[in-house]
Amino acid sequence: MDFKKVQDLLKYFESSKLTALSLEEGDFKLHASKLKEPTPQVVTTTPEPKMLPPEVTPKQQTNTANKATEDILLKEVPSPLVGTFYAASSPNAEPFVKVGQTIAKGQTICIIEAMKIMNEIVSPYAGVVEKINFRNGDVVGFNAAIANIRPVG
């Protein structure tokens, strides 16, 4: 489905008295709700090819296990809406956050533009930014992980 059509549909939905919207067209599925507990959006994509695991030596296996344990500690910052990702307030400005930076709870992480409205997204956690999952101009889906934060304290 064309992104412009999705934007127009969501704009209409926001201004309507409807409380829920469901749409399926081919592999594209969209679920939106104005209720306090939103229905998660499910987008069907082409499955990734299955890969055989590489041979692992005992030392590599320990590092992999430690890495998996560390990744469990990461917290995702979810997108509350569908829109366009911007890392800074303007093209020439410094990004709100960078990988490796320590941030406070409530600190702005990015802007997501939806229907010509710039929405500042703030971190629900204090911690260190481990990963930023989008680049300027990328389309962000509802509930997509914008960034991964390693909580402190």
Image (spheres, rainbow, N blue to C red):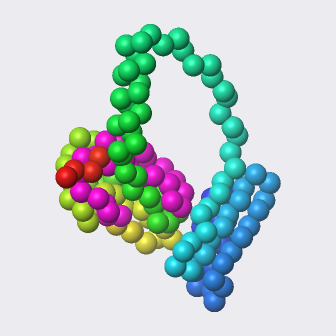
Q: Is residue 136 visible?
A: no
Q: Is residue 112 above or below residue 75?
A: below
Q: Say which residue appears at 43% left-offset and 72% top-offset.
A: 117
Q: Is residue 28 visible?
A: yes
Q: Horizontal placement of 70 versus 114: left or right?
A: left
What residue range appears in magenta?
Answer: 121-149
Q: Horizontal placement of 102 versus 47: left or right?
A: left
Q: Say which residue appears at 32% left-offset and 63% top-offset.
A: 124
Q: Is residue 55 above or below residue 117?
A: above
Position of residue 66 measured from the top left corner of the image (x, y, whole percent): 36, 29
Q: Is residue 128 magenta?
A: yes
Of residue 149 and residue 67, the one placed in the foreground of this image is: 67
Position of residue 68 measured from the top left corner of the image (x, y, whole percent): 41, 33
Locate the N terminus by quadrant.
Answer: bottom right
Q: Is residue 77 magenta?
A: no
Position of residue 73 measured from the top left corner of the image (x, y, whole percent): 35, 45
Q: Say which residue appears at 53% left-offset and 61% top-offset.
A: 142
Position of residue 48 measured from the top left corner of the image (x, y, whole percent): 65, 33
* Residue, far right: 26
Q: Is residue 103 above or below residue 15?
A: above
Q: Say which residue appears at 62% left-offset and 19% top-offset.
A: 52
Q: Is residue 142 above or below residue 38?
A: above
Of residue 89 and residue 41, the one placed in the foreground of this image is: 41
How many numbered circles does the render carry? Answer: 0
Q: Horizontal placement of 48 versus 117: left or right?
A: right
